Image: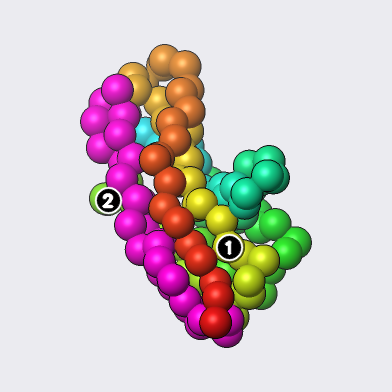
Amino acid sequence: QVQLVESGGGLVQPGGSLRLSCAASGSIFSVNAMGWYRQAPEKQRALVAIIRSDNSTDYADSVKGRFTISRDNAKNAVYLQTNSLKPEDTAVYYCYCIVRRTYSGPTFQYWGQGTQVTVSS
């Protein structure tokens, strides 16, 4: 199994910043991609940002220019730097990864428990 542990959420004023961190551990041969999703109350979970093994990235249109995703391959970790936060960024942020557990085996998806980000004055 693979475990994802997130940290860095909290309460921040509009215009503020937070850095979310997530580390994967367990039975991992390689990490294909890691990313962040978020889910606001009464809304569906949606992609925020993803970074692949070739370091290509994708962002939701709503966060482009404000959020930056990065990864540390040696630590199987992913980070999300969130700047210029808005009240509409308030949500539970979930870390996500796609891994191979063996050289030629299939890929698996795993989710973290989520970390709350609240943007409010």
Write down the region rendered in magenta.
1-29
Please, is residue 8 above or below residue 109 in the view?
below
Residue toward you, 90 or 99: 90
Q: Who comes first in sequence, dot 1 or dot 2?
A: 2
The amino acid on which the numbered mark 2 sits, given as a three-letter code, is Ala
Q: Is 84 displayed left or right of 100 in the figure? A: right
Decide whether residue 18 is among the magenta residues: yes
Comparing 7 with 75, the one in front is: 7
Residue 80 lies in the magenta-colored region: no
Q: Residues within 10 Å of mark 1 (few under 14, many from 20)?
A: many
Label annotation for residue 74: 2
Please identify the dominant SS of the magenta region.
strand
Q: Going 35% across and 51% down the picture, which residue do you hit?
A: 6
Residue under the image location 40 percent in, 40 percent down: 112
Residue at x-position 58% and y-position 50% = 38
Observer-nearest of 4 and 91 = 91
**Residue 57 seen from this side:** yes
Q: Secondary structure at mark 1?
A: loop
The CA distance from mark 1 to mark 2 is 30 Å
Residue with the most extreme right position: 61
Q: Quadrant of residue 100?
A: top left
Q: Position of residue 8 (x, y in %)?
A: 36, 63
Query: According to the image, label 1 marks what residue?
Result: 90
